[in-house]
Image (tube, rainbow, N blue to C red):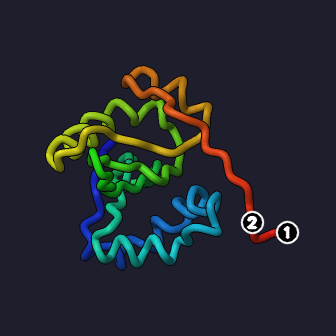
Amino acid sequence: MNFMPIPKDHIDSMWEHVEPIIKRAVGLTPDRISTEDLYEAAKKGSYLIWLVTEERDKVQFIQSVLTTRLADYPKSRALCIDFVAGTRMKEWLPIVMPVLEELGKTNKCSHIEGYGRRAWTKYLGEYDWKPRHIQFEKRLDNE
């Protein structure tokens, strides 16, 4: 398996392959961001879109798509993994984690933070990830 970012000047040519995969994750928060918003942000460089690929019969197949961005807080900087979609996470995590850790260090981040399903705890614990909180939400626009 390979893990690589899509340079922002290649977003246009890759989007038709990426969008059907990442829309599963982005679709969980339709009131916050759409795949069109993500596309525009990636073209501007606000998001970096990453691919986990696997070669079969000399053809690269996309297994997963991830997004990262930098977040500056008053007392720290984080590398944020906002969206993850695809398959075989357990297999690609050992390839992905060292790359993202190095990216975070290079960008002077104090930590990496991510958003995902509770079930991921069993895989992420091996890499010293710890749940920090549970997000609660009360919609105000549906009353």
**What's the residue type where badge 1 is placed?**
Glu
Q: Quadrant of the C terminus?
A: bottom right
Q: Quadrant of residue 69?
A: bottom left
Q: Are the residues at dot 1 and dot 2 in contact (C-beta closer than 8 Å)? A: yes
Instruction: Identify which residue is drawn at 55% across, 69% down.
Output: 33
Residue 21, given in percent of the width and then of the height, sits at 54, 60
Q: Nearer the viewer, residue 85 or 134?
A: 134
| Quarter in which the N terminus is drawn | top left
Q: The residue tagged with tag 2: helix, strand or loop?
A: loop
Residue located 55% across and 32% down the image: 120
Given the image, on which type of amino acid does mark 2 rest? Leu
Q: How many numbered marks appear? A: 2
Residues 16 and 58: in front is 16
Q: Is residue 17 left or right of residue 72?
A: right
Q: Place residue 96 in its image quadrant.
A: top left
Of residues 79 and 1, the one nearer the viewer is 79
Q: Is residue 26 above or below residue 121?
A: below
Residue under label 1: 143
In which quadrant of the rendered view does residue 99 lie?
top left
Name the residue carrying label 2. 140
**Label 2 crowd (10 A; few <14 / some 14-19 / many >=20):** few
User: What kind of element bears circle 1?
Assistant: loop
Image check: 57 left or right of 116? left
Q: Position of residue 38 (x, y in %)?
A: 45, 70
